[in-house]
Image (spheres, rainbow, N blue to C red):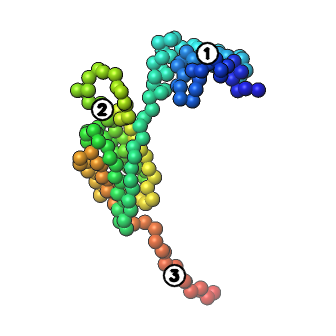
Amino acid sequence: MALFPHLNTETDSQFTPSHIPTLDELIAIDAASSPLVNSSPSVLSTLSSEQSDQNWQNLTQEEGQLAIDVYETDDTIIVVSAIAGVKSQDLELTLQQDMLTVRGTRTAPEDVGEGDPLISECYWGGFSRTIILPSSIDPQQTTARLSSGVLVIRLHKIANGGSIPVVELEEEEE
């Protein structure tokens, strides 16, 4: 039995792996499959067309992920990321326990114009990246530098761990 028996893959060629279905197509799929799943009305079908188009656009606009390199020395962790087109005021760095988050926004240049893109590979919009650090960090000695589109974050490790000497006590005689 087919997963979606109401779809004819020979005639419904718009349902291909490279095609992102429109909201109307998703509502049609949902409506056709709702009786199979349950008898309650679909959440998608209860939205107005304008609301659902806006919600669908919000769902499909993912936050970009930032590519990073992480290096470690005896006392420092260094995070490097190429983030061309981002100003320092558009960046937010947070350090919570052993997690570093880099979040920001890359704004498209205004002088590009209104033409239709021939090739569109650059990501414009919000991005973030969270990494778990291998050591505890001293936030007071952490620095971040943005120069020529390259962000370098230096995180100073806190010395933790190590051995604890065990002292043997002599038993008291009673």
Q: Secondary structure at mark 3?
A: loop
Quarter where residue 136 is shown: bottom left
Please give the label number shown on residue 149.
Answer: none
Q: Which residue is mark 2?
A: 107
**Residue 150 screen position, x and y as percent:** 28, 48
Q: Is residue 83 left or right of residue 135?
A: left
Q: Is residue 14 left or right of residue 162?
A: right
Disc 2 + disc 1, Cβ < 8 Å: no
Disc 3 + disc 2, Cβ < 8 Å: no
**Residue 105 screen position, x and y as percent:** 33, 35
Q: CA distance from mark 3 to mark 2?
A: 62 Å
Quarter where residue 13 is shown: top right
Q: Give the residue type that dot 2 points to.
A: Thr
Mark 3 or mark 2, which has the lower sequence index? Answer: 2
**Residue 130 screen position, x and y as percent:** 43, 46
Q: Residue at x 45, y 25 (%)?
A: 58
Quarter where residue 143 is shown: bottom left
Quadrant placement of the C terminus? bottom right
Mark 3 or mark 1, which has the lower sequence index? Answer: 1
Q: Give the residue type that dot 3 points to.
A: Val
Mark 3 or mark 1: which is in front? 1
**Residue 147 screen position, x and y as percent:** 23, 48
Q: Give the residue type that dot 1 points to.
A: Ala
Q: Report if residue 127 is visible in the image.
A: yes
Q: Which residue is mark 1?
A: 28
Mark 3 or mark 2: which is in front? 2
Q: Which residue is mark 3?
A: 167
